[in-house]
Amino acid sequence: MTTLKAARENKGLSQRALSARAGVPQSHISKIESGMVNLTVSSLTAIANALDLELALVPRKAVPAVRTIIRNVSDAPKVPPETRKEIARLAKQLEHIRSLKIDSSAFKNLQRQFREMQQFGNLIRNTDTLRSIRETLKAVEGAGDVAALEDASRQMKSFRNTLAHGMAGEDRARLPRPAYRLDDDE
């Protein structure tokens, strides 16, 4: 059960947080991780889903290949703690704005772009842009400023695109300009 413990720790979750996500008592998770209880399929499924893992039956002959693949995925860069904190702060701020019930397509776009940006969390080395987006969103929290939402949405889209295409701002400046632009292109 050290694999479950390692998966939990890689996600940055405490036993209590995993318990809340999986719907399995924290004391049971503790016993599972220490090998003091037999794991049921339902508990394993709930924990695996909470850890974003997939359960699969693998033929014995394929186990070495699967372990190699898992090891390669596990060696991928992790999300730095400061980035994780900044993403959590931004998520909390977006949740607060959602509670204000501002009906705006810009907010829906911002939420979608935030979810997409989170997929690139391990690539974020500088959290200044995330802080800048949070600062922009403060205007929304106070006065429900839709223009600030649109600005934050543009910032998030640009940041997400930069992460997805692997280009820092200075690298992008050296690229040749395109001969044409699409309407939606920023």
Image (tube, rainbow, N blue to C red):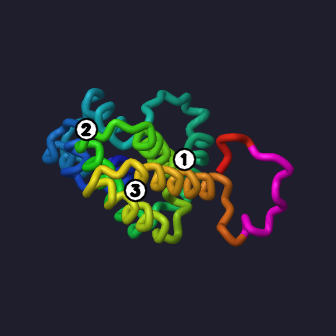
Which stretch did the figure color magenta? 171-181
Mark 1 falls on what kind of element? helix
Q: Residue at point 36% right, 43% down?
A: 51
Residue 71 drawn above or below residue 82: above
Q: Residues within 10 Å of mark 2 (few under 14, many from 20)?
A: many
Q: Return the residue at label 1.
A: 70
Q: Return the residue at label 3.
A: 10
Cα–Cα gap, marks 3 and 2: 16 Å
Question: Is residue 5 something one can see in this rendering?
Answer: no
Across and down, in percent, residue 184 comes to 65, 41
Q: Return the residue at label 2.
A: 22
User: Along the polypeptide, which appears first: circle 3 or circle 2?
Assistant: 3
Badge 1 vs badge 2, beta-carbon distance below 8 Å? no
Residue 134 drawn above or below residue 115: below
Q: Residues within 10 Å of mark 1 (few under 14, many from 20)?
A: few
Across and down, in percent, residue 109 comes to 47, 41
Residue type at numbered disc 2: Ala
